[in-house]
Amino acid sequence: MQLLTCAEYDRYHGYNQELVDRFVAMGFSVPTVVAAFEYVGIDKMDGQDYELEEAYMGDITARLFNEP
């Protein structure tokens, strides 16, 4: 894992880049993914990468696709 610059850290709002980029790889922008994480209440875990629980994955995906 590479260290983030201050600008990148701000862009990811403290979330782990690899965690966010899993959703970016699906075609969503970093700001959109970060906004979905914040809406759902995903823990930043001090910037560590971790496996999201299935329920959170569903909530994030629904938010990204603008589903109710």
Image: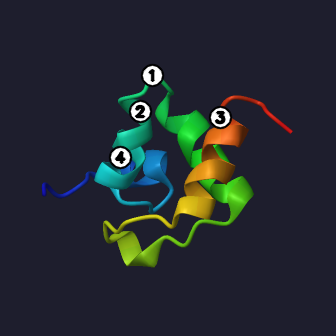
Marked residue nearer the N-terminal end (1 or 3) = 1
Residue that sits furthest to the left in the current view: 1
Residue holding disc 1? 27
Depth check, mark 3 against mark 4: the one in front is 3
Q: Is residue 16 left or right of residue 4?
A: right
Kind of residue indicated by mark 4: Glu
SS at circle 4: helix
Residue 57, position in %: x, y? 56, 53
Q: Which mark is residue 8?
A: 4
Residue holding disc 2? 24
Marked residue nearer the N-terminal end (2 or 4) = 4
SS at circle 1: loop
Residue holding disc 3? 64
Q: Nearer the viewer, residue 61 or 8?
A: 61
SS at circle 2: helix
Marked residue nearer the N-terminal end (3 or 4) = 4
SS at circle 3: helix
- C-alpha distance separating marks 2 and 3: 11 Å
- C-alpha distance separating marks 4 and 1: 19 Å
Pointers 2 and 4 in contact (CB under 8 A)? no
Characterize the local packing of mark 3: few (<14), some (14-19) or many (20 or more) Cα atoms within 10 angstroms. Answer: some
